[in-house]
Image (cartoon, helix red, strand yellow):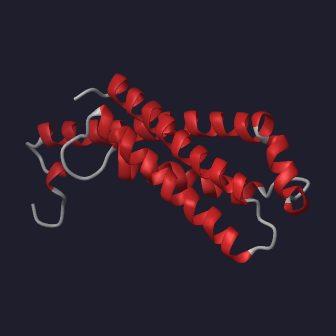
Amino acid sequence: MPGFPRHYRAGNEGEHKASHAHVKRQLAAYAGTMVVMVGLDLLWLGIIAKPIYLQGIGHLMAEKPNLVAAIAFYLLFGLGIVVFAVLPQGPPPGWGQTIIMAALFGFFAYATYDLTNLATLKQWPIGLSLLDICWGAFVSAAAAIGGKALMDWIAPL
């Protein structure tokens, strides 16, 4: 039937089930990634590293975070981890590749932010930048582990 995607045509139930399973995997990967990433980041920023950030850049920090910007960051960053590490194009990656690619994704994203700040802002602390870049790599890898684990548990191949 022209005009309809193949998986909607009569007689292609197998393709429709495969498509449904793929969407289920994507949603599970995203949900697992987001839960781990947001949970760890709230713990890190709100408790563990808060004194370090206050000491280094407290004079730049808002009293209350911009929630719209924060939500946009988490939604986009989590999607990036899923797209580039948990469910990249091609054959499904193994655990090692998922963790390495997620850590690299976080490393490059956080390095872009921190090195830009070092290059453009007065008195931006280099120690804080190094810590933040390491955190970006770690939290991204941990989030990818959460995403892949939930995906493999809910919708195994």
Looking at the image, the residue that sits furthest to the bottom is 120
Number of marks in the rendered image? 0
Along the viewing direction, whichever of 25 and 99 lies nearer the viewer: 99
| Residue lying at 56% horizontally and 33% vertically, measured from the top left | 36
Depth check: 22 or 61 in front?
61
Q: Does residue 120 appear left or right of residue 105 in this picture?
A: right
Would you place residue 19 above or below residue 125 in this image? above
How far across and down, in percent of the image, does residue 59 sit? 91, 61
Residue sitting at x 87%, y 59%: 62
Q: Nearer the viewer, residue 136 or 78?
A: 136
Residue visible at 63% across and 57% down in the picture:
72
In this image, 60 relative to 72: left or right? right
Single out the residue that lies furthest toward the top.
Answer: 153
Residue visible at 32% across and 45% down in the picture: 87
Tell me the quarter of the image containing the N terminus: bottom left
Above or below, comparing residue 30 to residue 114 in the picture: above
Residue 93 place in picture, x, y as percent? 25, 40
Report the side of 12 relative to 80 (left or right): left
In the image, 47: left or right of 9? right
Point out residue 97 in the picture as x, y percentages from the top left corner. Answer: 30, 40
Q: Position of residue 32 (x, y in %)?
A: 48, 33
Nearer to me, 24 or 103:
103
Q: Is residue 62 above or below residue 131?
A: below
Q: Residue furthest front?
A: 127
Q: Which part of the image, by quadrant, shows the C terminus?
A: top left
